[in-house]
């Protein structure tokens, strides 16, 4: 069975894709690669290729999956930016990438909202990149209102608490410095976006499918729709192989 590598957002763990783990088991094996820690001063492209190298060594050099069988790549938010670079790296080493899926993300650095870029750049100079107040907020919400919010929202807050501050800070620095035009990759793409995404607003990108009244963490908050949309496309690609 072909692997489907899914990369999480900057303040998320592998639990971001818990609803997808078994949803597509008829066609692929969903794998959330372990994070590699960002290095100080590293660019987004360099980080993505280093993450790609870890995937290559762990899953292909080891012989767990044969290169000729190919794979899928995808991700949400920051993970969706990383995924195509990982796919390109794998193809350079003879792994066929059959499709790339982008969720709640942008297609290139030029689609990052200018205000967000400025804000992220400024936050980098605060202790912890501004993530300590974010963690305190999430902790308070979970302590005071856990019974009154959805499971998906609780899970998002918990993942913010579980993610190392310095990793988040370095990823935000990479995002604020990521300037790249729209480029071609040697594999097809499919992108899903939420109509009400406030972190990466819809008006800055051009997805294939827009989910009405949906926010950012679609794999958790709109998991059934995401699973159905991607599952249908996976089935079509696999049956055509």
Image (cartoon, rainbow, N blue to C red):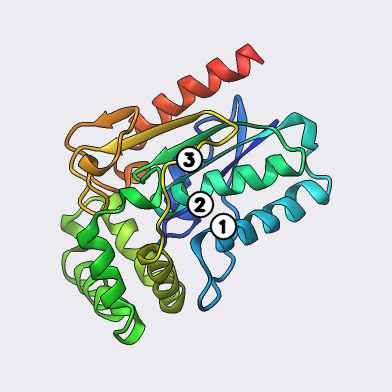
- Would you name the residue on which mark 3 appears? 183
x then y, percent, for residue 64: 79, 44
Label 1 or label 3, whichever lies nearer to me, is 3
For marks 2 and 1, the one nearer the N-term is 1
Instruction: For mark 1, give the secondary structure.
Output: helix
Q: Quadrant of residue 9?
A: bottom left
Q: Is residue 27 above or below residue 93?
A: above
Q: Residue at x 40, y 25 (%)?
A: 229
Instruction: For mark 2, give the secondary structure.
Output: helix
Q: Nearer the viewer, residue 63 or 123?
A: 123
- Would you name the residue on which mark 2 appears? 82
Q: Is residue 72 left or right of residue 105?
A: right
**Pointer 2 with pointer 1, Cβ within 8 A:** yes
Label 3 vs label 2: CA separation?
Answer: 14 Å
Can residue 93 be seen in this snapshot? yes
x then y, percent, for residue 200: 27, 50
Q: Residue at x 34, y 44 (%)?
A: 104
Q: Disc number at residue 48?
A: 1
Question: Can you say which quadrant of the picture contains the N terminus?
Answer: top right
Determine crowd level at label 3: few under 14, some 14-19, many 20+ residues with C-alpha closer than 10 A: few
Determine crowd level at label 1: few under 14, some 14-19, many 20+ residues with C-alpha closer than 10 A: many
Instruction: For mark 3, give the secondary structure.
Output: loop
Determine crowd level at label 2: few under 14, some 14-19, many 20+ residues with C-alpha closer than 10 A: many
How many numbered marks does the figure carry?
3
For marks 3 and 2, the one nearer the N-term is 2
Label 2 vs label 1: CA separation?
Answer: 5 Å
Q: Is residue 95 left or right of residue 50?
A: right
Label 1 vs label 3: CA separation?
Answer: 16 Å
Q: Is residue 166 above or below residue 65?
A: below
């Amino acid at each position: 069975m072909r692997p489907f590598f899914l990369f999480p957002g900057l303040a998320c763990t592998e639990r971001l894709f818990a609803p997808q783990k078994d949803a597509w088991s008829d066609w692929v094996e969903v794998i959330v690669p372990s994070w590699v820690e960002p290095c100080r001063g590293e660019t987004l492209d360099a980080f993505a290729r280093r993450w790609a190298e870890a995937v290559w060594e762990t899953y292909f050099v080891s012989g767990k999956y044969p290169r000729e069988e190919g794979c899928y790549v995808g991700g949400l938010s920051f993970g969706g930016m990383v995924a195509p670079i990982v796919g390109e790296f794998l193809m350079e080493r003879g792994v066929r990438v059959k499709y790339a899926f982008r969720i709640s993300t942008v297609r290139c650095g030029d689609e990052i909202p200018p205000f967000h870029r400025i804000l992220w750049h400024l936050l980098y100079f605060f202790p912890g990149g501004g993530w300590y107040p974010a963690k305190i907020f999430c902790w308070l919400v979970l302590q005071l209102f856990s019974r009154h919010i959805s499971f998906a929202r609780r899970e998002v807050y918990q993942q913010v608490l579980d993610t190392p501050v310095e990793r988040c800070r370095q990823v935000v620095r990479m995002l604020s410095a990521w300037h790249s035009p729209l480029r071609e990759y040697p594999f097809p793409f499919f992108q899903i976006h939420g109509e009400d995404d406030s972190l990466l607003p819809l008006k800055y990108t051009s997805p294939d499918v827009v989910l009405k009244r949906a926010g950012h963490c679609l794999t958790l908050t709109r998991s059934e729709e995401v699973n159905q949309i991607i599952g249908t496309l996976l089935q079509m690609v696999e049956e055509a192989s």
